[in-house]
């Protein structure tokens, strides 16, 4: 490994690293007191996402407070939906101007030039890069087409199971696939823009992909994911595919085309390494395990580290940090990972 290459990027490329890199999904959020104070002052999550100075400050918080090995852009997966022609507000979760159920709804959405329409995101990335230490790279990200479509087709409002898109795939597959295809085009352009602005790695979040059967994943999601990662492969930065609740999709995940597979706690990570020798894997500590007693948290982290010793592993949670997670437990997790060396 080059002395100048950040630990996280080296691990993404499958290189042997002196220790395991660690970062956490949703590491910038309510677990951090400065974030809570800033949010109280600003009063609007939309402004926090869109104000370059504020978004930069929030992105840097976990690097400074927790000592994680990578920063991730403070934004939302719905950032590219607004310029498609569907405004999004937060109350507190996302509320869309309209939901998709007909061909006319899809026609109201349009692709756009991310360079122009989301210039503030590029501004944020440039500011972050100018303030990050060289050892801590910046991860850009987007929501996957299937996951965004899942939210956008939930015409009855936000349900617990989000059945709208799957229903649409059965009743009006042409409309559902047209929506997913349009979101695929947007994801490619949006992520490419982030790299041009300075992002050093990219993660595609697929929070709802587990709702698909293996057969449906292979026919509906996989070709679109392959198209995204094929385009991104020419950009020269590592790519990560996060598949939530996807243990039943393991046999197909290696065909997505991402450099790194990121999985939740329901996936047997040791089995995944055995299935995909040499493929870097990110994950997969259960976020709710952080509510255990501190010694139990540390023991659980050490167990995962020991089970993945010798593998190209990036330590992360299996999903985002829960907002009520004890801050000291997060610190304990990061410190335990950073102090662990193979065989210890």
Image (spheres, rainbow, N blue to C red):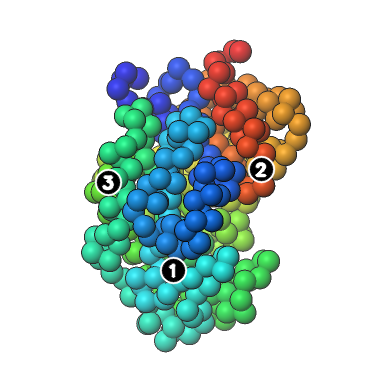
**Quadrant containing the N terminus in the rendered view:** top left
Q: CA distance from mark 3 to mark 1?
A: 30 Å
With respect to residue 265, does 305 lie above or below?
above
The mark closer to the camera, 2 or 1, is: 2
Q: Which element type, helix, strand or loop, lies under badge 1? A: helix
Residue 266 visible? The answer is: no
Q: Residue reaching furthest top?
A: 343
Identify residue for label 3.
Answer: 126
- Residue positioned 40% across, 45% down in the render: 57
Q: Position of residue 166 (x, y in %)?
A: 59, 71
- Residue positioned 61% across, 13% down in the render: 344
Identify residue for label 1.
Answer: 180
Q: Position of residue 303 (x, y in %)?
A: 67, 25
Q: Which element type, helix, strand or loop, lies under badge 3? A: helix
Residue 84 visible? The answer is: yes
Which of the pair 269/18 is nearer the observer?
18
- Residue positioned 50% across, 61% down in the render: 43
The mark closer to the camera, 3 or 1, is: 3
Q: CA distance from mark 2 to mark 1?
A: 34 Å
Identify residue for label 2.
Answer: 325
Q: Position of residue 275 (x, y in %)?
A: 55, 35
């Amino acid at each position: 490994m080059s002395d100048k290459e950040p630990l996280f990027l080296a691990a993404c490329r499958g290189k042997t690293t002196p220790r395991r890199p660690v970062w956490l999904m949703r590491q910038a959020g309510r677990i951090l007191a400065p974030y809570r104070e800033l949010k109280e002052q600003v009063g609007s999550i939309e402004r926090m996402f869109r104000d370059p100075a504020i978004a930069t400050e929030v992105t840097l918080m976990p690097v400074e407070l927790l000592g994680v090995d990578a920063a991730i852009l403070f934004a939302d997966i719905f950032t590219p939906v607004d310029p498609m022609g569907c405004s999004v507000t937060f109350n507190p979760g996302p509320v869309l101007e309209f939901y998709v159920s007909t061909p006319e709804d899809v026609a109201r959405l349009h692709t756009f030039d991310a360079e122009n329409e989301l210039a503030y995101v590029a501004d944020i990335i440039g500011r972050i890069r100018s303030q990050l230490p060289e050892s801590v790279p910046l991860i850009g990200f987007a929501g996957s087409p299937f996951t965004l479509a899942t939210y956008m087709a939930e015409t009855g409002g936000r349900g617990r199971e989000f059945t709208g898109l799957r229903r649409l795939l059965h009743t009006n597959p042409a409309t559902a696939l047209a929506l997913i295809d349009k979101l695929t085009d947007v994801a490619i352009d949006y992520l490419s823009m982030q790299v041009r602005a300075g992002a050093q790695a990219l993660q595609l979040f697929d929070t709802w992909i587990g709702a698909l059967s293996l057969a449906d994943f292979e026919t509906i999601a996989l070709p679109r994911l392959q198209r995204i990662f094929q385009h991104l492969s020419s950009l020269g930065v590592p790519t990560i595919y996060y598949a939530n609740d996807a243990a039943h999709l393991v046999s197909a995940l290696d065909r997505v085309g991402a450099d790194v597979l990121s999985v939740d706690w329901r996936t047997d990570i040791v089995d995944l390494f055995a299935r995909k020798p040499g493929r870097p894997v990110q994950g997969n500590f259960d976020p709710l395990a952080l509510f255990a007693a501190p010694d139990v948290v540390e023991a659980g982290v050490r167990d995962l580290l020991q089970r993945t010793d010798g593998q190209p592993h990036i330590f992360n949670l299996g999903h985002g940090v829960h907002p009520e997670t004890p801050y000291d437990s997060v610190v304990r997790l990061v410190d335990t990972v950073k102090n662990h060396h193979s065989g210890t």
